[in-house]
Image (cartoon, helix red, strand yellow):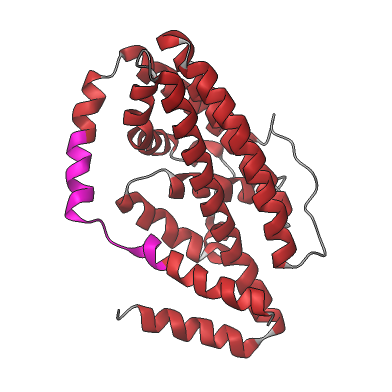
């Protein structure tokens, strides 16, 4: 196996361990704080974000609106990573400009940032799927995209739940229903809302909205990009290890098992 891939395997295992980590006392306490915050946010905020997430989810599941290039073939992982990081950089720039612009406009214009940022994030995930060689015309790949989204923007308890599915994706995808109504978009939107509520509340504040909007959007897109790379590494490296190097695949499994006891 290439040295680059070997390094990425070790980084991937560290990330996987973080995804499996159980919620801490602080994580659990923050949920109560979040519930209090929900009660002070304006009804218009809840209405806008709920509608935006519901519509975005349906668009992704139906496979409409968002288009991307065909899956890229015949590149090694390092070449794909270079393309992915450049794409993330471009989308971060777009998100920063959009966040600063809507943040400077006050509450009404600031609310417009919510569906716009969602659109930017989903478009990025479509692009990254293509870069790593996966076809988003496949309904199951679009579900995988939504799982990456949830992994990046959910409570640790929900992260554990989603990550378990993604770790066993080849088996899990065979159980997926073709009915889009079976997707739990309510849980999806609640987790996302809870994750970004405080940041977006500050973005609506006069005077600091532009700065907060730019900063928050940059961080959110950066995290999503990082998680997407790891999520696709998880599938790419498993596939490469299986095809090219059974000894390294055995080592990866052994390393995972050892980490269970740390």
Q: In which quadrant is the N terminus drawn?
A: bottom right
Q: Nearer the viewer, residue 201 or 256?
A: 201
Q: Nearer the viewer, residue 107 or 214?
A: 214
> Looking at the rendering, which quadrant does residue 121 occupy?
top right
> Looking at the rendering, which quadrant does residue 160 occupy?
bottom left
Residue in the image at 25% along x and 56% along y: 23
Q: Percent from the top left, x then y, of residue 80?
A: 72, 59
Q: In which quadrant is the C terminus drawn?
A: bottom left
Q: Main secondary structure of the magenta part?
A: helix
Give the residue at the far bottom of this rendering: 247
Left/right of residue 57 with respect to residue 190 in the rendered view? right
**In this picture, is 249 found above or below 7?**
below
Q: Percent from the top left, x then y, of residue 62?
A: 64, 34
Residue in the image at 43% along x and 79% along y: 256
Q: Nearer the viewer, residue 132 or 160?
A: 132
Q: Percent from the top left, x then y, of residue 130?
A: 72, 50
Q: Is residue 104 magenta?
A: no
Please give the range of residues in magenta.
17-33
**In this picture, is 151 found above or below 94?**
below
**In this picture, is 75 found above or below 122?**
below
The answer to whether residue 27 is seen in the rendering is yes
Q: Percent from the top left, x then y, of residue 244?
A: 71, 83
The answer to whether residue 134 is seen in the rendering is no
Residue in the image at 50% along x and 66% along y: 168
Q: Is residue 18 magenta?
A: yes
């Amino acid at each position: 196996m290439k040295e680059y891939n070997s390094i990425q395997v070790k980084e991937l295992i560290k990330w996987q361990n973080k995804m499996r980590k159980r919620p801490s006392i602080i994580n659990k306490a923050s949920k109560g704080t979040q519930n209090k915050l929900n009660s002070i946010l304006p009804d218009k905020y809840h209405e806008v974000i709920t509608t935006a997430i519901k519509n975005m989810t349906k668009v992704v599941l139906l496979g409409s609106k968002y288009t991307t290039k065909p899956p890229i073939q015949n590149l090694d992982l390092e070449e794909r990573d270079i393309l992915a990081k450049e794409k993330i950089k471009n989308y971060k720039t777009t998100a920063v400009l959009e966040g600063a612009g809507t943040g400077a406009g006050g509450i009404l214009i600031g609310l417009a940032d919510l569906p716009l940022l969602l659109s930017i994030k989903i478009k990025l995930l479509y692009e990254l799927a293509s870069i790593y060689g996966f076809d988003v015309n496949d309904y199951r790949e679009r579900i995988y995209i939504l799982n990456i989204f949830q992994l990046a923007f959910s409570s640790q308890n929900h992260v554990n739940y989603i990550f378990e599915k993604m770790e066993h994706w080849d088996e899990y995808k065979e159980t997926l229903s073709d009915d889009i109504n079976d997707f739990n978009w309510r849980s999806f939107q609640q987790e996302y809302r809870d994750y970004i509520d405080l940041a977006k509340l500050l973005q609506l504040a006069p005077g600091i909205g532009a700065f907060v909007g730019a900063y928050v959007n940059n961080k959110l897109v950066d995290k999503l990009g990082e998680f997407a790379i790891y999520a696709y590494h998880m599938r790419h490296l498993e596939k490469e290890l299986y095809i090219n190097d059974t000894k390294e695949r055995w080592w990866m499994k052994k390393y995972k098992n050892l980490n269970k006891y740390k």
